[in-house]
Amino acid sequence: MTGYYPGCTLHTTGKEYDLSVRAVFSALNIELNEVPDWTCCGATSAHGDNEVLSYALPLRNLVQAEKAGINRVVVPCAACYNTLCQADAAIAEDSGAGRKAADIVAETDGEYGRGVEVVHPLSVLSSDDVLIEIEKRADKRLSELKVVTYYGCLLARPAQRVAFEDSIWPQSMDTILTAMGAQVMKWSYRTDCCGGSLGISRPDLVTPLAGKLQSAADDADADMIITACPLCQSNLESKRAADYEGRWLPTMYFTELIGIALDVPRWRRWLSQHIVSPRSVLRAVGIR
Amino acid sequence: MSSSADLSIGEIIRLCLLGARDEVLAAKGIWMCTGCRTCQDRCPNEIDGCRVKDALCALTKETGRLPAEQKISRFHAAFLGTVKYLGRAHELSLMGWYKLRTKTYLDQLPLGLKMFFRGKLPLFPSTTKGRRSVAKIMKRVRERS
């Protein structure tokens, strides 16, 4: 059974990501069963606090998934995906901290039998069968849209524990977007950090990083940045320095574009969730 | 982040090797790290820079030192605080807690309002009974550290 772990952010600041993932998977007839009683994965804050905690919090969710009969869990948020993969790896490697985390979670929720595969929607949607289906059904309305693909950090690093493709030159998003007819422009910043969770405490550190990425996307002649992480999306969209000169491109999730191409019900709702509206860019290429 | 930080990860590791405890635990660089995991992924000597930096942050707090980047440290504490009580992160509680502790009431208010009116900052937290497990997990991790 395929499970779904939205994580905290997809219920709040990443709402359009949650809506678009669910809509796209539904349109492709891949059933998603939300992990019962899921809780926070710990994100960046847990691993900066305590290593055992950084494994225990996500591990609890793997135990919940396993108990529900889930053998593969789809995790859209890159931070959640990273922590769940790392917790699974820590148990497999039988590391000291991993063992301590497993013991604690065994007391509160149960033993983990390593029966859950953690996957990102990018790897599911770029897999051969699904890609053929998407290509067949996408109506090529994206053909005039010029985008750059931004993967961010946590989907790919540390490669050994987490990456489902090349961590320096990932291609899954490019493959999906190209199959749908969009123009994917070349650029070299696909895995450069956006500033992550520093957006609230030190926005002054995030604005130069977001600015650098925006400027590079502009130089690549793109009209939009496409991402797969809610924190990246938020930083790229809203962390514009007051003195930034140049175009500030809208940032959308890759699943939103798939939803548009498949013309899923109510995709226009997602657009009003954005802080920087993608409407004018979409309208300019004929998508209303 | 190394261009903005006082110390790069390479310098942090070198200071650890030299035993410069006071200097490294007073560094801003260990807090400014975004956790991008580039050092962890690429070090040719297979040093896990992320785990070193995480351990240094934990050590700073354990030894009662003041984190060099208070706002960053308080943000993470606020995040974990909402997780402890609700089982899930709740932005508004987190922001409230963080702003009270750092007195940054008006910071990024326009953005916050934009997000609020788009339904991105729900008033009421999404919670679940698993929050009791989360609280227990956090307590036991503390006790056994």
Image (tube, coloured by chain):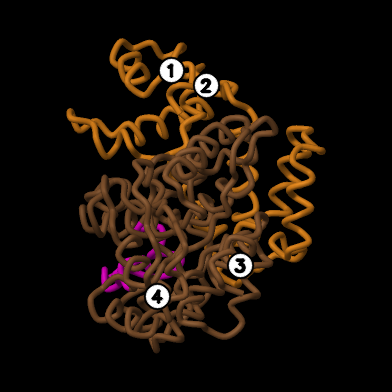
Chain colours: A brown, B orange
Q: Could you tell me how far apart the alpha carbons at marks 2 and 3 are, in whole angstroms?
A: 45 Å
Q: Which mark is residue B28?
A: 2
Which residue in the structure is indicated by mark 1? Answer: B7
Q: Are marks 3 and 1 on the same chain?
A: no
| Chain letter of the residue carrying label 3 | A
Which residue in the structure is indicated by mark 3? Answer: A283
> At numbered mark 1, what does the secondary structure look like: helix, strand or loop?
loop
At 61% from the left edge and 48% from the top edge, which residue is drawn?
A: B79
Asked whether the viewer can see residue A35, the reply is no
What's drawn in magenta, residue-wise?
A102-124
Is-magenta flag for residue A172? Answer: no
Which quadrant is home to the C terminus of chain B?
top left
Q: Is residue A190 left or right of residue A23?
A: left
The answer to whether the residue labelled 1 contacts the one labelled 2, judged by CB atoms less than 8 Å apart, is yes
Amino acid residing under circle 1: Leu
Q: Residue B102's spot in the image, x, y percent?
A: 74, 33
The answer to whether the residue labelled 3 contacts the one labelled 1, judged by CB atoms less than 8 Å apart, is no
Q: Quadrant of residue A275?
A: bottom right
Foreground pick, B132 / A201? A201
